[in-house]
Amino acid sequence: MNEIKTIVSDIKKGNIKPIYFLMGDEPYYIDKISEYIEKNVLDESEKGFNQVVMYGRDVTIDQIIASAKRYPMMAEKQVIIVKEAQDLARSIDQIEAYAANPQLSTVLVFNYKYKKLHKGKKTYKAIANNGLIYESKKLYENQVADWIRKVLAGKKYSIEPKASQMLVEFLGADLSKISNELDKLITVLPKKTIITDKHIEENIGISKDFNNFELRKAIGQKQVVKANRIINYFTQNPKNNPLVMTISLLNSFFTQLLMYHGLKDKSKGNVAKVLGVNPYFVDDYSSAGKKYPMRKVSQVIGFLREADIKSKGVGANQSSSDILKELLFKILH
């Protein structure tokens, strides 16, 4: 995020590069930088003649270069944004000659999602020397809760660990989706609000009592009745609680529990660091570790793999509901 702030700050100061090559596996930041350039480099009065949005599937590199070499009309700069530029992957190296000597009055932006330029190529070096290359890396799921906290802090909000974990477990590591949901919260809650699981339930529609976070906690504490209530809710609301997500999250939990058993230093700080979790959740692993010895944890991971295979229709003809109920029984008994 610091790199993003630097890019935006430089643009605000008028230190604008002739080429921005935005690439990588996380589209969220690529879109954010591109949108900022699109909205802020030119005044509204200048955009009509001097700002163009192209799509990689509809243009060639030659056409992009021809447009980039034109001079702006009644403005200091022209802006050309090439969205979905990854569709030009086979011919992208043709930009090398232009990148080596770019038109300084043009701001050429490539949104090159889910792909990367090879650092050893001349094209990469030419763009890096005369423009800016930004690689947007995908966050690991265990980094997303902290990302949510930082984003909200920047907007004068805070969030309880359980609430952020609910968002992560429901939306995964999709930063665009999470950002959209955070925007919903911000529009209805006053600044300095501490966002709780109740806010998440009321404004986003994720049940604070019947979700994967609560299921994992109930299983970890061997609360049989509560765990069964939750999976019954899941089976009645399969669209919001897909089996594949539940299996994946439980597998992550028991894999981390296996790591917990292998630790010599089980202090809260070390467990949080090694497992990559918020210290708030360490007690969940300590409690589950007492109820699930290492041998049982290994067995549960095997059950989860079997359930995953069955959920894909391999070697069994069971409904998602039956697979989930069978899995829960095996884990708890």
Image: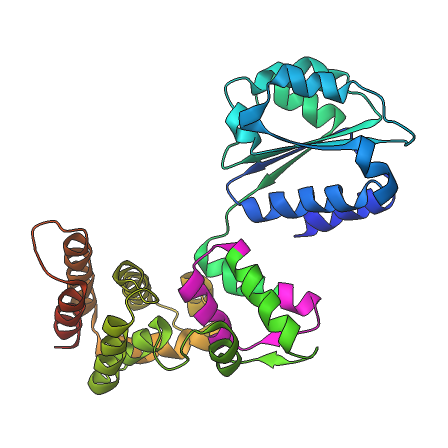
Residue 90 falls left or right of residue 42: left
- Expressed as whole percent of the image width and height from the top left, the position of residue 70 reads 80, 19
Query: Residue at coordinates 39% horizontally, 69% vertically from top-left?
Result: 265
Residue 118 can be seen, yes or no = no
Task: Please report the bounds of the magenta region as a residue range.
Answer: 151-176
Residue 88 position in % (x across, y down): 54, 23
Q: Is residue 78 magenta?
A: no
Location of residue 319 (image quadrant): bottom left
The number of discs equals: 0
Residue at the (53%, 45%) spot, across then down = 26
In the picture, measured across the screen, residue 61 lies left or right of residue 115, that is right
Q: Is residue 320 above or below residue 12?
A: below
In the displayed structure, 333 sits above or below 4; it is below
Of residue 81 and residue 253, the one placed in the foreground of this image is 81
Reply above or below: 2 against 158.
above
The quarter of the rendered structure image containing the C terminus is bottom left
